[in-house]
Amino acid sequence: MNLDPQTIERLAAHLDAAETECREVHKITDDYPDMDWEDAYAIQDALRALKEARGVRVAGLKMGLTSHAKMRQMGVIDPVYGFITDYGAVADGGEIDTRRLIHPKVEAEIAFVTKRPLSGPGCHIGSVLAATDFILPAVEIIDSRYENFRFDLKSVIADNTSSARYVLGGTNRNVEGIDLKNLGVVMEKNGEVVAMASGAAVLGHPAQSVAMLANMLGARGREIPAGTLILTGGVTEAVAVAAGDNVNVRFQHLGSVSMRFV
Ligand code: OOG
Ligand code: MG
């Protein structure tokens, strides 16, 4: 690690304030070019502790940048993880207030809920499928706190991987008998198709994203507890939205998820 504990706390508070005050900030690696991966996750941990200290509940975990579409869009090459919160949850069909966000984008994701703990190293797709309680269709609304949504991996890890809101669909399915690789996803904005993909877009299979999360956490002495909700990462590139937009995402076998931006 290259940053001292005070700097880590200060940067976490800085990113938290940017989120709560809905304003953009410079990416933090501009001022701290020497920060390393451990520093980046330490800032995310400090951000989580700060939110929990004021009563926020962590509602699950997320993987980000797990699809080629997203990696190409953001110009990065490695997946990252973060957490999702109680205040980020929006009901299916609900309204999302864009005044509380900076420059939101939507992405279609497949969510997993575990029934057994998963730990790495050595976690593989078989362990994940055996430990999966059910899957759900999801839409994540990301909102980087950085100017123009431009960042590098360390900055985005510190910023809790742009986590902002998420909408879960109500159809839960057992993974058995569902071909997740071929599961088609079509995203419509204001009635027009704006993106489409299949489950294989995420690391070849969305369960692979959960295995990678368990292995990334394992490298830091942590695991995925039983009963954890995990967003596995956008299957398509993220699509910018603004007040007045209606988004509807259809997932083969899993139903659709929709929301309105006001
Ligand atoms: C980082 C978060 C990416 C995903 O699903 O790929 C993410 C970003 O692109 O702002 O959540
Ligand atoms: Mg995402």
Image (spheres, rainbow, N blue to C red):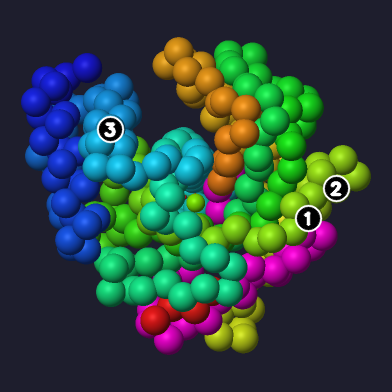
Residue, disc 3: 49
Q: Position of residue 89 (x, y in %)?
A: 47, 57
Q: Which mark is residue 112?
A: none
Residue, disc 2: 178
Q: Which mark is residue 183?
A: 1
Q: Position of residue 50 (x, y in %)?
A: 23, 37
Question: Tag 3: Cα neighbours inside 10 Å, few (<14), some, or many (≥20)?
Answer: some
| Vertical arrangement, residue 60 with respect to residue 126, above or below | below
CB within 8 Å, label 1 to label 2: yes
Sequence order check, earlier mark of 2 and 3: 3
Q: Comparing marks 1 and 2, which lies closer to the viewer?
A: 2
Q: Amino acid at mark 2?
A: Ile
Alpha carbon distance from label 1 to label 3: 36 Å
Q: Amino acid at mark 3?
A: Ala
Alpha carbon distance from label 1 to label 2: 8 Å
Q: Position of residue 19 (x, y in %)?
A: 24, 55
CB within 8 Å, label 2 to label 3: no
Residue 206: in magenta span: no
Q: Residue at x 45, y 13 (%)?
A: 221
| Vertical arrangement, residue 59 with respect to residue 247, above or below | above
Left or right of residue 191: residue 134: right
Q: Residue at x 53, y 20 (%)?
A: 223
As helix, strand or loop, the secondary structure at mark 3 comes to: helix
The magenta region covers 232-258
- Quadrant where the N terminus lies? top left
Left or right of residue 189: residue 241: left
| Vertical arrangement, residue 101 with respect to residue 50, above or below | below
Number of marks in picture: 3
Question: Tag 2: Cα neighbours inside 10 Å, few (<14), some, or many (≥20)?
Answer: some
